[in-house]
Image: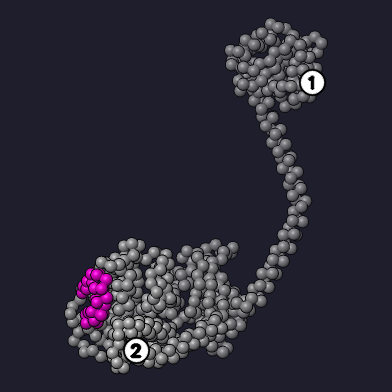
Amino acid sequence: MNNSKILVVDDEKIVTSAFKALFKVEGFSDVNLFNAPKDAINFLKDNKPDLIISDFLMPEMNGLEFLTEAKKIYPEVSMILLTGYADKENAIKAINEIGLYKYIEKPWDNDDLLMNIRNGIERSHLLENLRNKIEELESAKKQLEEYSTNLEKIVAERTADLSQANKKLSGIINYCADGIIIIDSLGHILQVNPACENMVGLSETSLCKRKFQEIAYSNVKDLNKSKDNKSGGIFGLGEDNSEILLRDYYIVNSLSGKSIPVEISFAVISSDEDNNAEKYVGVIRDVSLQKETERLRDDFIATLTHDMRTPLLAAIQTLKFFLEGAIGELDGKQRILLSTMLQSNEDLLGLVNALLEVYRFESGKLTLCKTVFPVKDLVEQCYEELKPLAESKNIKFNLEFELKNNLHITADRGEIKRVITNLCGNAVNYTNKGGEINILAKAQSGDFIFSVTDNGNGIPQADIPHLFTRFSQGTTKKRSTGTGLGLYLSRQIIEAHNGKIWVESKVDKGSEFSFLLTNVVTDARIKERQVSNG
């Protein structure tokens, strides 16, 4: 407040000197003293004070006339009139007519004067703030009036836009070839489109009384585990609000009784009615044509590869016949050439056999022939077959058993041998000369665990998810010229046994391939026999 600008007008210099001394003592720094009212008027044209003090009787212009002019320039500024006792009545009249803040009689009391000065300055600030607020309110009122004027027009335009968008969206949903379904977190059907009604063979009214699990199913056991889930999101939905694609699903048509193969993409949608109720929209696509095309393709490949076996076997047998010297002795170059041709034909036959095995597993035409057999004999047989290849690369081949010599398991011996041979063969192929491979077989709580570890180049983490897919070479870095079917076929065999196969790998440190067969360990006293496909 001591920085406030104060203007004092009095024709007597002794009075202005007294004010100057008083204000200096009280710490007021911006004090402007005038003995002529006209000089003060000129000052006010360029300077706005916080308080004006004026004497009543002055030559040329009295205090009332001066303050009237000042009031025209700054109506919010507080003004104090100094007057004698004889002019008291005129001062009161001036307060009522001009709107002055106070009048003070001469001689004044300094404490009373200072109190009125401070209150006057505070009043000026309050009035100025009030005027600013009023201007802001007037501006806001004007804007509100303008907005109110246009609000009806804006609402009409937005309503028309929403109506048009709703018509487009309804058209897309109603005439979409794919089925569209909305469900809650427990699978209750809330809404469907006509395509979904046609696919299921039921009206929307009937479908809204059912659960999604009642109209769809999967032949993959793990996908049906959430069928009776009552505590969480359906099929894992709602756990992280991410989209999910359901493959290998079928929709049952209640009219024809046929099962339609479909792919369903689910995503979370917000609910304005109840923020705590999760809802999901699913797009159901009929993939019957795609499945039929895949079946025809696989049948063609299976037929082609099967027909290739006979000429390949004939060529291999003929080349062996030549190499055995049945048509005479061969020189070195002839033997090398025929041996190369024999190896190429045997590699091609291996590819044909692998393709046929993959087709048999995928088509469900392969029936496992499970028997009870000693697992140690099988592992050692595979080990002995691959040992010469490991020795040719100077690879240290270690075999370790954490199981009893008479341990037996129930499985398809030939198929398990194929898996073990493939995993160990890969380890030999991808381990550098002078490397080391460790084979471990053990039993644990009725389960059989097999693992093979190498110290080769390893596999990048980004490539591991694709490792057990068809035609995968194991890594984006070229590893071999193999078919890319070995690990895929191994996965098919292990999963057909209700087991699990996996890999752990670090680049430049090596890889560990393992598989687990659950509940296969059998009492060794049981004689080797066939059992039903389990």
Q: CA distance from mark 2 to mark 1?
A: 127 Å
Q: Secondary structure at mark 1?
A: helix
The magenta stretch spans residue 376:
yes
Please indicate whether residue 472 sits to the left or right of residue 124 in the image: left
Q: Please state the horizontal and vertical placement of residue 289, each as a whole percent of the image.
A: 56, 83
Q: Please state the horizontal and vertical placement of residue 133, each as a whole percent of the image.
A: 69, 36
List the residue tagged with mark 2: 319
User: Which quarter of the figure is the C terminus placed in?
Assistant: bottom left
Quarter where residue 6 is shown: top right
Task: Say which of 345 and 308 sits in front.
Answer: 345
Quarter where residue 325 is shown: bottom left
Q: Earlier in the sequence, mark 2 or mark 1?
A: 1
Does residue 229 show up?
yes
Q: Please state the horizontal and vertical placement of residue 329, each as a whole percent of the image.
A: 28, 90
Task: Say which of 13 and 194 sits in front.
Answer: 194
List the residue tagged with mark 1: 69
